[in-house]
Amino acid sequence: LRSSAAITNMLRKHALPKRQHLYDVICLPHGNAIINVEDDRIMMAGMDMSHQRGRKSVGCLVTVSDIKFRTFWPYPTLQKPGKELVDADEMESLFAEALADYKQLRGFYPRDIFFYRDGVSDGQLASLISSEIRGIEAAIAKLEPEMHPGFDHPIRPRLVYLVTQKRTNSVFCELRESSLFNVPHGVVVDKGVVSGVVWDFFLQHLPNSRP
């Protein structure tokens, strides 16, 4: 694992001190754990980039590897100034390290990987597939298949890759008695006003009108 001192020095030197969006996490309270699931062979991962004019861009892959979803492992990377996407080779190296750490902690590889990527526009989606996603898939392809509950044959981890976009022009309201009200947080809209080309959805993450 990369030492905390090395990570701290990298972020102090290259990142904006008050930029916290690399580590923004949506938590779902459930009992005493943040998330409680019966099937725990899951890896949650996310990545974002921080940009500052005239300096190298700082990216950080963060994974969650324990059953209570409380242990976070950071894997920082430096990119050219203003560069958003990570090359396939670099992403493969980062994710291979994350998978190895998961195996060391849990004793097995994850069965399912849910990867959240922030900061990517619609115009960058094609490049995202040929760079970061290709790198993740390459790291997974090098793993030895393992047996998992519910399967009668060894498998490699299955990847679900989600691009999150917070800057949207869409607004949702609830009509009650001829008046409009904010939609409660947690509402998901996945029909009617979504893309007909890719699978997407709107998630109301705050109790207001903008998803």
Image (spheres, rainbow, N blue to C red):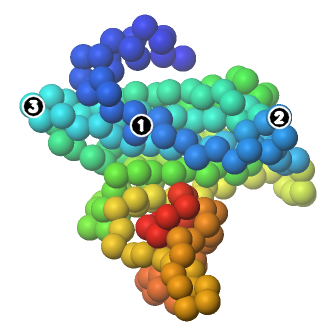
Q: Residue at x 61, y 52 (%)?
A: 114
Q: Residues within 10 Å of mark 3 (few under 14, many from 20)?
A: few
CA separation in Å, label 1 and label 2: 25 Å
Q: Which residue is mark 1?
A: 22
Is 173 above or below relative to 133? below
Is 177 above or below relative to 86? below
Q: Residue at x 23, y 38 (%)?
A: 51
Type of amino acid under label 3? Gly
**Residue 74 location, x and y as percent?**
50, 27
User: Which image quadrant is residue 127 in?
Assistant: bottom left
99 with respect to 103 (left or right): left
Residue situated in front as seen by the camera: 104 or 50: 50
Q: Residue at x 73, y 32 (%)?
A: 66
Q: Which residue is mark 3?
A: 54
* Residue 112 visible to an observer of this rendering: yes
**Residue 184 location, x and y as percent?**
61, 66
**Residue 12 location, x and y as percent?**
29, 16
CA separation in Å, label 3 and label 2: 44 Å
Q: Which residue is mark 2?
A: 32
Q: Residues within 10 Å of mark 2 (few under 14, many from 20)?
A: few
